[in-house]
Structures are given as structure tokens and as C-alpha cells.
Amino acid sequence: MPAGTMEEKGRDNVLVKFEGFDFIDGGVCAPKGFQASGVHCGIRKNKEKKDLALIFCEKDCTAAACYTQNKVKGAPILVTRQNLSDGKARAVICNSGNANTCNADGEEKAQRMCELVSQKLPVDPKDVIVASTGVIGQPLPIEAIEGGMDALVAALGRTPQQAQDAAFAIMTTDTRKKEIAVSFRLGGKECRLAGMAKGSGMIHPNMATMLCFLTTDVCIEADVLQKALSRVTKVTFNRVSIDGDTSTNDMVSILASGLAGNACITYENEDYEIFVNALYVLLMNLSREIARDGEGATKLLECVCTGAEDEETAETIAKAVITSNLLKAAMFAADANWGRILCAIGYADASFDIVRVSVDLASSQGTIRVCENGSGVAFSEEQAKTILNEDEIRILVNVGEGKGRAVAWGCDLTYDYVKINADYRT
């Protein structure tokens, strides 16, 4: 995957920019052919919070998706898997406030959501991606969704505001919307790729807990699209952890309208690699935003492991570090307790020589080495505190001279995480 540089994008986040890929406005409506909307239909008690989102394309799309690896799966995933078995879709409907999971009538209601879209728009119910997020084990109030469909469809449009409404409608405990769009070129044609995501808690690798809906106007065959999405999801969303809990409803899906006019991607050629890199730009930045917005979090943690014998080893080590609750608590306190990092590295299920391990801590305030050759080194606690008081911390782990490298993302563990999850249901 390409190397990138930081770019300020608004007051609340910092995106990583890559040469050849430009950030643009418009959210999921930026690619040609797509409309979106978001409304409050009544699932959530707070009428100020939108709870129903819709994405619709003017033509049939090739489609792909990746799902949670939790053995307990939400009813919407079961329905969406069946609907996408032919590699086609045209619309997405998603509610927040209720996960529609572990309910006897869950699949029936998920299918009903697809039918409701079909009744209002020229789309077959089997060409609808359906998703839900929220409390598990509570009956989904399908009547609220039925009652909100007229307003949802009437609100459809191609503006950045309508894309933003959809992004807000899928949020649960998120404190900010997460939407990104990029433009790039394939064979001289401008192409666009965009996504909106939600995710703040109950997030762990192997399909980090989140929902993500992607749109693109690239022409690409469904099986090639699935290969690209699976490949990039593995090194982005599957490397995010907030709290060690893998959810039941995680899903990332993509619709490709083909309206950009590029030569259709039918195999893994040069255009395919450019598209994969575009996907990485988008999903990596969304992964960072999910980690940054972890429940109660004050800091984004990024662990970069280098020098491993292969990428899989580096990934295992990086994940072990960012999922350590002891380390996450230390980062909250800006405490350079490097022993907790070595402890996490030590229990990672990976092969390496601990006496070759070095650890640096870094932020916009500089870099400081805290461990070398598997042992502590003298360092300034005051300087370390200054570095760790920033809201984005990089933990740089080197385990040898191999070529294996991987990045994983997480956040600090704060008092507010417990407060948020102690009364989440009530």
C-alpha cells in the first residue's frame, strides 16, 4: 500500500493524503449516479437524531461486502449476504438505534426493510443491502421504518448535505460523522470513490465493529470488486480495536455504478492496483477516524511494527499492542510505561527475538526512545509526558531486520468508556 502524508481536513480530524488521490466534497453522493438521505423515523427517542439512512443509485451496480466474524450475526447480515450472492445491488437502507439481532423475527423484518425500499423506488428487494446498528436483543420497531419511508425517499438527493444526513443517520455512540470521498484517474478518466462509516465502541479486529457503505463510479466486475474489498479490509478495518469486543452486525459494502467511463476492470491489472490503492486511502482514513472516535477516547493510538519476518507477524504484534488495556490506560495518563508495550509484544502469538526489540513513542511533539535491545534506556520522563499529552500517539516497534511491516489503530481507555457502556441499553 502507498505511503502517505498528513493533511488537515477540518477542525476535528487529520486525514492521510496520498499522491494521485485528492480528497473531495460530497460524501457518498460524490461518485456519479448516487443519491442519499437520512431522516428521523422514530426508532430513537431523541427526535433531533436521525435514525434511518438510504443510498440509491440510478442504475444497477456491481456490489461486494465483507462481514463480521462473530458467530452470532445480525439478521440484516444474513439477508444482505443472500441478496449479494449474485454480485449486484442498487440501494442501501440502514437504521440506527436497534441492531435487529437475536430476534426470532429478525430476518423477516430485515427482508421487510428491503421490500419497503422496493415499494418506493425502482429496485428489486433482492438488490437492496440492509443493515442495522444499536442495541442487541430488542425487537426492531418496523412500524417506525414503514412510517418514515415517504420522508426518507422524498429527501433523496445528490448534495453534500444529503450525503451528510445519511452519515449522521447511521451513528450510535459516535461523536462525529465519518465520511470521506476521493478522486483519482483510470485511463485518463476521472473516477470517484466515497464512503461513510459508523463505529465508536464494541470494536475489535476481524471485522472491526462498524458499518461502512462505499460508493464508486468505477466500472469493475463483481468478483474483482470483492477481491479488492477483501484485500483492503484486511489491512484497515481488521486492524482497528477499541475495546476487544467484535460485534454481531459489522459490515462494509460497496456499490459500483460504472458511470465514470473507465475501461472496465475485469482482472487484476494496473487499473485494479490503482483502485485498490484508492480503497486503501479511503478505508485507512476511515479506520483512523473510528479509532479516534472510540467511546470515551481522548487519543488516537497508531502502532507501527517493522522489522518482522513477514507482514503477518508484524500485524499480530501491532494488534497485540493496541489491544492492551494496560497500555491504553497508560496512554490516557500520558505515562510512558514502556514495560506494558513489551508485555503486549511478549504475549503476541508471533515469532521474534525479544532482545532485538526497540520501542519509540512519537507525536507532533517529537519522538523518544524508551526501549532498545529488549531493555529500558534512560529517557526524560518530562519529554515523554509532553509527547504523550498530544491527541495522536504513534508507538513505533521494531523487532529486527525483516521486511515485514504492519499498522494497527486503537485509542486510550478512559473513565468515560465505562460510563458510556454502563448504561448503554437503558
Image (tube, rainbow, N blue to C red):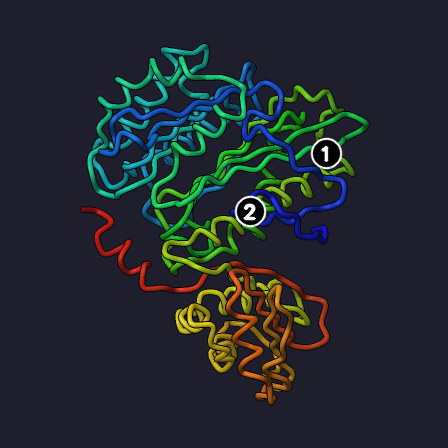
Q: Of marks 1 and 2, which one's residue comes earlier in the chain?
A: 1
| Residue occupying image coordinates x 74% and y 24% | 262
Foreground: 419 or 387? 387
| Residue occupying image coordinates x 41% and y 58% | 297
| Residue occupying image coordinates x 54% and y 26% | 160
Q: Which residue is mark 2?
A: 233
Residue 134 horizontal/vertical position (percent): 30, 41
Residue type (three-letter) at the residue carrying disc 1: Phe
Mark 1 to mark 2: distance in Å? 20 Å
Viewer-side label of 1, 2: 1
Helix, strand or loop status at disc 1 = strand
Q: Which residue is mark 1?
A: 184
Q: Quadrant of residue 22?
A: top right
How many numbered discs? 2
Q: Is residue 353 above or below residue 98?
A: below
Residue 236 horizontal/vertical position (percent): 56, 51
Helix, strand or loop status at disc 2 = helix
